Image (tube, coloured by chain):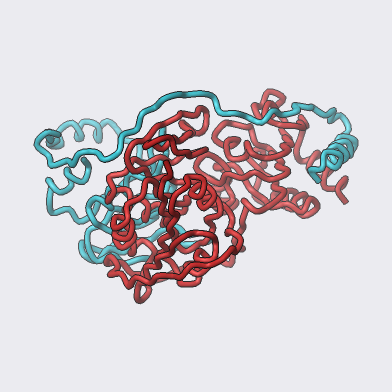
Chain colours: A cyan, B red
Amino acid sequence: MLAAAVRHIGDVDLVVTGDSSVDVAAKMIPTVLAGELGWPAVAEVTAVSGQAGALRVERAIPGGVQVLEIGGPAVLAASADAAVPHVPGMKDLLAAGKKPVEHLELAAMNVPARSAVMTVTGRSRPDRKARKGQILDTTDPAAAAAELVAALRGAGAL
Amino acid sequence: MSVNVWIVVGDQPTIGNLITVARALGGQVGAVVAGPRSVAETVAASGVDKVVWCSAPGEVPIEASAAAVADVIAADPPGVVLSGRQPSERVLLGAAAARLHAAVLTGARSVTADGDDVIVANAIFGGIAEETVAVSGPVALVLEGGPVPPASGTVPVEELAAVPLGMKVIETRTSAVDQVDLGAAPRVVGIGRGLKAQQDLVIIEALAQAAKAEIACSRPVAEGLNWLGKERYIGSSGQHIAPQLYFAIGISGQLQHMVGVHGAETIVAINSDPNAPVFADADYGLVGDLYKIVPAITGALK
């Protein structure tokens, strides 16, 4: 559906998304969208510069940053800490109300039928390992430490 | 009914868990690799039935092979496609999922076949609950990759010289940081916001050394404060580990963190707040000042 919307808008050089939704936190919408469009996708993006057709993208990798150049339209998912969010003030809120919003009719967009159907058949609390919940007396930290180490060694954890 | 599986691999052959899950579905297990040839060779010796290696010329990132990976999978459509949680692997999986119009789930705890359907026990909302989802049609799953699988027989690596998407690597800047494999560490010491200053990490390091443990942290310590690298944070959107022993120090024990260590054999919690939720999730709890208790434990271990 998002891909159909992007194609409808046409002339799109870049789609920027956040890291993930707060509830599902799947981090997959941007990558699947890119797959639908046949565009390059990059996640954990920390900076973008350059121009259409020559985007310079910085993305986080373990221990540092990698800089990529992308020669066409792309989907970029920002990392969760890429930017400090700007809290909109009253002026921004009022200006937002005046910006044009185009409504797209789902039926008019060319959205392919689903191939897979998911049905939730049950919901439960996950099985949790039972914990001892043993609270040690910490009046004397050294004694508590000795007791803990003895208990851990006894339990085979150390 | 057996289900055929494709495993999507980037530049890390850490797919032991993916192979285990795939094998349990009873069908063919293929792997498509978009990384260096050495990774394809490791995967070829790990007990899969087939390996396709998308080789790309020049300095291109893993993601440039996404379309090629999708082509390989679409040519032999499976019931299930799996990947680990690395960002580049998610990009490859997304391309495959789009091509197959597959359902996507990212919290799978177990995956089984039931007639024509695939049944997934899927953790939701940060792990607070688990849904049983029956999927008819193809499904793409993001799972913990697991360790590098042990070698067990080998299959040929089929090379596919794919046309990459228009991306190239210009520069890579890494600080000299040791790559840590938290998933392989038998003992882990986790630190949270109870630590007052970055330089106080020395007392945690001393404990970790005495306990022969790796150091990890809660999300704010890595992402907010940047005191430790992001690969060290444990939580619903970070690392999930199951060590023999986990110390939760100065960590309140919120679900978003604890869901990453629920598999630990033994959990020790140290916190100054007697009402901290972490104590409900611990085998041993020590209420008090970590600045006194942690050095005491370090001393007791020597």
Looking at the image, the residue that sits furthest to the left is A108
Can you give x and y, in whole percent of width and height, for residue A66 in the image? 42, 64
On the picture, is A148 further left or further right than A125?
right
Tell me the quadrant of the picture where the N terminus of chain B can be found. Answer: top left
At a point 63% along the width and 40% down the height, the residue shown is B192
Q: Is residue B170 visible?
A: no
Q: Is residue B56 visible?
A: yes
At a point 56% along the width and 46% down the height, the residue shown is B239
Could you say which quadrant of the image residue B45 lies in? bottom right
Can you give x and y, in whole percent of width and height, for residue B141 in the image? 42, 44
Looking at the image, the residue that sits furthest to the bottom is B58
Q: How many marks?
A: 0
Instruction: Note whether B291 is above or below B283 in the view shown.
Output: below
On the picture, is A69 further left or further right than A133?
left
On the picture, is B125 further left or further right than B234?
left
Looking at the image, the residue that sits furthest to the front is B1
Can you give x and y, in whole percent of width and height, for residue B105 in the image? 40, 40
Can you give x and y, in whole percent of width and height, for residue A96 in the image? 20, 34
At a point 30% along the width and 38% down the height, the residue shown is A116
Instruction: Note whether B274 is above or below B3 in the view shown.
Output: above
At a point 44% along the width and 59% down the height, the residue shown is B9
Camera-nearest residue between B28 and B64: B28
Camera-nearest residue between B161 and B1: B1
Camera-nearest residue between B221 and A66: A66
